[in-house]
Amino acid sequence: MAATSMLLKLSVLLNLLSSSRFGLWPDRKHAGVFPPTCGRIECPSFDVVHAGDGYEVRRLNSTVWMSTAPIPDISLVEATRSGFLQLFDYIQGKNSYEEQIEMTAPVITEVSPSDGPFCTSSFIVSFYVPKENQVSPPPAEGLHAQRWKPVYVAVRQFGGFVTDSDVAVEAAALEASLSGTTWANAIQKSREKESSASTSAYTVAQYNSPFEFDNRVNEIWMPFDMEDASSV
């Protein structure tokens, strides 16, 4: 009952806040802010390889994610809400081991954009699996584990509650910040090598609970192969 009550409250709040702009930073630097959430719950470890103007490049260490199947939708916010509710059930014990799992951050949404503004895109929503569960994460119907080797990402940060318009603006701003850099060329080369309907163009990482209004940290990640950076 407690889990059901919490799920209902979470769903209601997500609906209320899906277009909210509370919690925006008055002076956003777009990179280099350590998410306060990661001082309280487990987050993936990473190293900063380069700090640029409005972005940074990170090396994410090996990680394990529990992920939804691709979710077709025109809205990242709606797809993320749908995927997160599946993942919330999962950590509450709706898995093959009936095991409760500690909450972590961030929840990420991999975005494979459509060809037009009113066409359906594809989204995969994922929960970072805590280290103690990574050897054998509990399986669950409709979810699958992703095991990432160390990966490089260009990152831009932004505050507030994520909206569809914010994501488009912030992703474009990251592209603009990277323009003319080795990193931009590497991202493009990586996309060309892996081009397919299932390849994500970028990932949106959200670090905060929907119950947190202040100091919210969100990120756009654009992954690439470091070999592509070295060869340009």
Image (cartoon, rainbow, N blue to C red):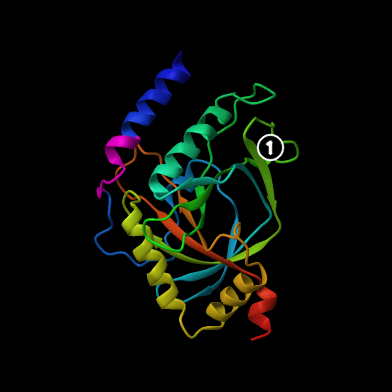
**Quarter of the image where one finds residue 130:** top right
**Quarter of the image where one finds residue 98:** top right
68 over 202 or under it: above or below? above
Q: Nearer the viewer, residue 143 or 103?
A: 143
**Dot 1 amino acid type:** Glu
* Residue furthest top as drawn: 1
Q: Is residue 166 left or right of residue 195?
A: left
Q: Is residue 15 on the magenta stretch?
A: yes
Q: Which residues are magenta?
A: 14-22
**Quarter of the image where one finds residue 211:** top left
Q: Is residue 91 on the magenta stretch?
A: no
Q: Nearer the viewer, residue 164 or 131?
A: 164
Q: Residue at x 42, y 39 (%)?
A: 81
46 over 11 or under it: above or below? below
Q: Is residue 2 left or right of residue 16?
A: right
Q: Nearer the viewer, residue 188 or 208?
A: 188
Q: Is residue 100 left or right of residue 79?
A: right
Q: Residue at x 75, y 40 (%)?
A: 135
For label 1, the residue is 132
* Residue furthest right as drawn: 135
* SS of the residue under disc 1: helix
Q: Quadrant of the C terminus?
A: bottom right
Residue 145 x, y percent position in the rendering: 68, 42
Q: Nearer the viewer, residue 143 or 207?
A: 143
Residue 23 x, y percent position in the rendering: 27, 49
